[in-house]
Image: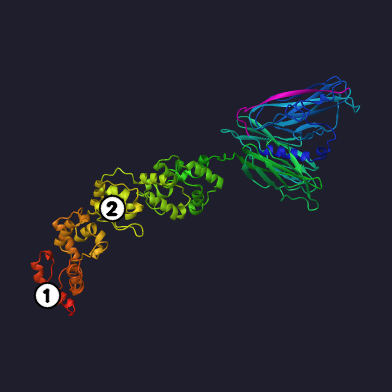
Amino acid sequence: MRESTIRTICICFTLLFSGQAFAFSGGITGYSGNPASAGAGAFCALCHNTGLPPVVAISGPGSVAPGSVTNYQFTINDSLQPTGGLNVSASSGTLLVPQGETRIKKVGQELTHGLPTAISGDISWSFDWQAPATAGIYTLYASGVTANNDQTATGDNAAIDALTITVANQGPIPTAVISAPLTTTPNSSVAFDGSSSTAPAGATINRYDWVINGTDFPNTGPNQIASFSTNGWHRVTLTVTDSDNASATTFADILVADSTIPEVNPGGPYSGDAGVVINFDATTSTSDPTTALTNYLWDFGDGSAIEQGSSATRSHTFAVEGDYIVTIAAQDGNGMTGVASTVVAISTPDPQPTTGEEIYNLQCNSCHGPAGSGTPSVPKVIEGATQQQLLDAIVNVPAMNAITLSNADALLVADYLAVTGSSGEALYRGRCQICHGIDGVGIAGTAPPVIGSTREMINGKIISVPSMNTIVLDNAESQLIADFLGNTAAATGNGIYDVKCAICHGSTGAGISGVGPFVRGATQSMIQGAISGFTIMDGIILSNSEAQLVADYLGSEGTTGQDFYMNKCEICHGASGIGGSAAFIKGATQFMIEGELNRIAEMNGILVNSQQSQQIADYLGSGGATGQDLYTNRCLICHGQDGNGTSGPYDGESIRGEKASEYLEAIDDKEEMEGILLTNTEAQAIQNYLNGGGG
């Protein structure tokens, strides 16, 4: 809104606070013939209707520019009656009482007479109308009444007229602006500044014409100094003309008074949403120290009724988005009035989401993708998240702490993210995927892989892991999930192992502490026996050929004797051959190894060639340099503790008391000892150890 417009509003406020505004000694509003007014189209003839109706007319320009202030006249012709009055309203825009016009007053948004005015054949009233800022077709309505002054409606009558005005841009014109104080004291110099006036693009302001209280000051430049000797309102008018000879006019009214004019502080600027209450506060406004502010008048600039009261605070709701000028007039006990304006920016609030999908898209989609499918930056899939998981994440994940989600909203989002269906895949996605990842691959830092989980494992975890206690699955559903997690098209031992066994026994078969044992080297019969013998493995289905592929994978790899031992023997005979579920075999020779592979059914699937079996034997016979070390790693397997013979797993004879040369001779003579390598020094060390000579 231009400054001239704001000043015009301020003037109207002050007039409302004058003695006339509060007197209501004559005139009435709502009866101008305006269908939108309180009288709903009625006019003064509703009561004054027995005499001859007068002739009435509104006159003035039928086309004006948006926001312009234009003068109009309303005339009554009646040669019979001695007095007349009026009521004027507008479909939009602002009606103004011109400076010096004392016969009419503004009440609310309408004009009416203060007292009946004498008619001598005819009478005219002058008023101003500020056009709306929006182009369109608008209407002025006026009702004129003539009366015989007998204090009754008998013999009186009324008539109405309306003037349609087109508000439209009329080509580029300059904008006239006056900057000046609203009040001053008598005989004080006041500076009026028109330098903020602007010309259309390509033009310049080249003439400033001033009129002060009816006196012309033509082409005196953008600044004008004036003083006023009498109290009251004084009008200063500025007309600017640009280099294209287009002109525009504005005015400013200044109040001259001896008393201190209240200084109104309206606060602001304010902002808010359409339909939401905005609280305005003018409590820091000041007045003459000898008197207090007693009355406030508020125009919120949105076409609503002007409000007044004794409170310096006021609440208002704006229905439509836009920028509004809010003007506040404050009157003190001396009758002095101050006026000020502030601005309020009203936005249209974003529609609040009401469905789970809408809430999700507003709060979660940017990170977790459509329907919880994840994004490159936050790949975690949250499809199937529960209400509690959503609420917990908001608390526990720092990046989500700013999200506000009520319990009801979280439930709506959970319902939206829920996965329907009864297949193993649907059940997994709806109950497990949020923690254990797509297809059970696990999520680092959240939950481990679950590929290959059996029904018993799933049911056990639901009971033993607190965060899973709320999951409800029956045995049939658990089995469907297990089938989904163990389903594979893999045709290699490695692939089958990864989806059937790795969850408990680790990715390489080395075992997981507290979960599943070391299984490298497991044979086909061991694998099938474990599936049949351990309840937790119920539901794992492997054909004999698949079990053999897994066994081949678990027994493969490596180039050293240690590698071959770990991948073929350690599962039963323990680390380094010290024994486990099967016998101590440190010191086993190639002859013994190959013999046992052929003799023991469980070992029939272990495949080693002669070179590999010798490498295993070399590994089992290595380590240590003392007589005890050498005996343990070369001889104990057959000759038992301390060389007594009977305690060894192969029932070798007692060699206590024998000499080193006899050890070497036996190694050369006996096939089962072939491959044992002892030097004379090592043989002597064993003799010393067994016969108490140290070693």
- Foreground pick, 36 / 252: 36
Point 33% across, 44% down: residue: 487
Query: Counting residues from the N terminus, which is met first, the one under dot 2 or under dot 1?
Result: 2
- Foreground pick, 138 / 239: 138
The x, y position of residue 680, in whole percent, is 11, 73
To which residue does mark 2 refer?
A: 529
Picture disc at residue 175: none
| Kind of residue sitting beneath label 2 | Gly
Position of the C terminus by quadrant = bottom left
Point 89% across, 27% down: residue: 152
- 620 vs 260, left or right, is left
Is any atom of residue 380 visible in this view? no
- 472 vs 6, left or right, is left
In the rendered image, the vertical position of residue 187 relative to residue 613, given as above or below:
above
> Which residues are drawn in magenta?
155-174
In the rendered image, the vertical position of residue 165 relative to residue 508, given as above or below:
above
Q: Quadrant of residue 409?
A: top right
Crowd around label 1: few <14 · some 14–19 · many ≥20 (10 Å): some
| Kind of residue sitting beneath label 1 | Ala
Q: Is residue 604 magenta-colored? A: no
Q: Quadrant of residue 481?
A: top left
- 528 vs 176, left or right, is left
- Foreground pick, 338 / 413: 413
The x, y position of residue 24, in whole percent, is 83, 36
Gap in angstroms between the C-alphas marked 2 and 1:
46 Å
Mark 2 element type? helix
To which residue does mark 1 refer?
A: 660
Point 17% across, 63% down: residue: 617
Position of the N terminus by quadrant = top right
- 166 vs 14, left or right, is left
Q: Quadrant of residue 658?
A: bottom left
